[in-house]
Amino acid sequence: MAVFLQSLISGILIGGVYALIGIGLTLIFGVMRVVNFAHGDIMMVGMYLTYLLFTLMGIDPFVSVLISFPLMFFFGGFLQKVFINRVLNAVSQNQILLTIGLGLIMSNTVMLIFTSDYKILTTSYSSSTIQVGGGVSISAPLLISFLITAAITGALGWFLLKTDTGQAIRATAQDRDAAQLMGINVSRMSVIAFGLGAALAGTAGALISPTYYIFPQVGGTFTLKAFVITVLGGMGSVVGATLGGILIGVTESMSAVYISSGWKDVVVFVLFLLVLLFKPSGLMGKSRT
Amino acid sequence: MTKTILKAATGLIVLAALLVVPRYVESPYALHMMILLFLSVSQGQSWNILGGYAGQHSVGHAAYFGVGAYTTMMLMHAKQVVPWVGVWAGVAIVVVVALVIGSICFRLRGPYFVLASIAVAEIMRLSAINLTTLTNGAEGILATEIPAFKIGERVVTDFLTKVPFYYIGLVLALLTIAITYWVQHSKLGYYFQAIREDQDAAHSLGIHITVYKNIGLVISAVLTSLAGAFYGIYVGFVDPPTVLGLDVSVQIMLICIIGGMGTLWGPVLGSLILVPLSEALRSNMITEGLVKIGLVSADSRIGLFLKENLAHAHVLLYGILVVLVILFMPEGLMGFVKKMAARRNREAV
């Protein structure tokens, strides 16, 4: 029972960070209908940014979110303005290919700069745990990152629901043409949405960097995982992405314990194929694109 | 009419030249480049059949490439099965895999199909890492020597030089080109194109979409697995990232995209550009060139950096090329050439 509870809790905690990656992706898809295959690589850039801030300036990874969030926001906005914007009306495979290309450029540029060695970011609390009782313990960095994730998700929810810009973004996601006709600056909303998506991915990268290996190719798996999460939750749904993230986190940590850690990603991808097969609109989605 | 004759004549001359190359060219490096070119053409052409003609952009072709390579290598390594025989075991497995993948993925469209195809290839890659008793895990399989192919006592191929590989590669490339040509001009190909252009319209005309997509996938997957088997045997080494990684799938697509999807000569053109470029990077030719013309000194920091890292930069180059092609030449080079030709014709009139 303790093992079960233990893996359930760590699954939920890591799932929170996954949710952050998924929300970023779903936001981009919702507003632009572009499937961003560079999402995991953007997260990887966030990880290296955190690593740099930590090793060069000694800034704690959780504090560095304050710096990396705005930086990644501008990075995302830049990517949207310079590249993605040009393929908004192109066929979907061109959008996919463009973002795959951008991802390759990011991961291989980072590889040229930092080599492909695995980097580890060790903080004083990296391996500390909190005893909950009943033989169950919680990893401190995972708990902190989960709390930060929850705060960011809450703030994002407030932004999307209550602010004018947030409402304009949601309107754009609902119907691009109608939003344009209502006087919403759709292209600006796209830049903001992509910026936010990148900032969330980058933040997720920052939050997992104390507990995860950092290497240039780390993005590939996360891109796919982000998709699994968003498809599971229904493409374009922020609530769905949150649920999907936690579901994937729990599935992963359960299969790591009860099957083997080597097969945990396989379990996730098989689950993904099953969802595509039986409920392609996702758990929260209604229509199928 | 004269144009057709001219085309046929050019084709025959090129073919004759390709056939006699190993007689006159002894440099193993030149032969190696030609073999890589053949491999690239057959990979690109195989993808083209499904991606270019039927419009199903799989980003998971590494699955078929890797299964072909692994099966042949595993049989050879563990049971000393001659590649000529092992290849067919790979093909049989790939047909089954393709049909399973097809029946799952072809119910999905657009980005969903792409995602599913990647997920399948990732499952294959992770399985290859985890099924250590079968695949030797992350270490991969190294084949030190290839058993000679004998009929009775007579040795048919010994694989001691690059020459047999050259001819097998040439046959493979020609085979894929021929099959593409056939697809392009057959009823099957017209069905494919109808599905690519408008799936719903094709369906309403009575074309059984799922069946034809699966046919396209099986043809494409079998040819890709042949290329994979050829690659495995030629290089003598397979491991999960080099034959099953996402990079492999992207590389296969890229040959087509750069050259032009859905055209007969697109993948050939793409290969003619990509193979020399990535080899130049891999073999450090560019660094040596920069040193030679005096831009960089060999033992300076920049020189050493380039020498050490440029070899890995070919994937970066792929990324840059994809972005440039999509932004500026979405139809690939063949599309660009056609557009230019059309413009010239218009001006001539």
Image: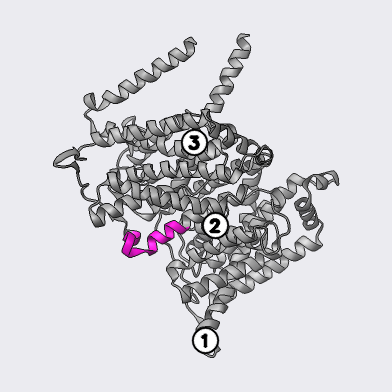
What residue do we see at 61% from left, 17% from top?
Answer: B343
What is the C-alpha distance between the residues marked 2 and 1? 31 Å
Residue B127 part of the magenta-drawn span = yes
Q: Which residue is mark 3?
A: B256
- Image height check: is B270 above or below B145? above
- Subunit ID for the residue under disc 3: B
- Depth check: give the residue in front, B86 or B237: B86
Element carrying mark 1 = helix
- Depth check: give the residue in front, A274 or A20: A274
Q: Mark 3: which amino acid? A: Cys
What residue do we see at 49% from left, 41% from top?
Answer: B253
- Subunit ID for the residue under disc 1: A
Among numbered discs 2 and 1, the one appearing first in the sequence: 1
A21 vs B5, left or right, is right
What is the C-alpha distance between the residues marked 1 and 3? 53 Å
Q: Which residue is mark 2?
A: A224
Q: Which residue is mark 1?
A: A2
- Image height check: is B228 above or below A126? above
Name which quarter of the figure residue B29 lies in: top left
- Depth check: give the residue in front, A72 or B40: B40
In magenta, the rendered stretch is B123-138
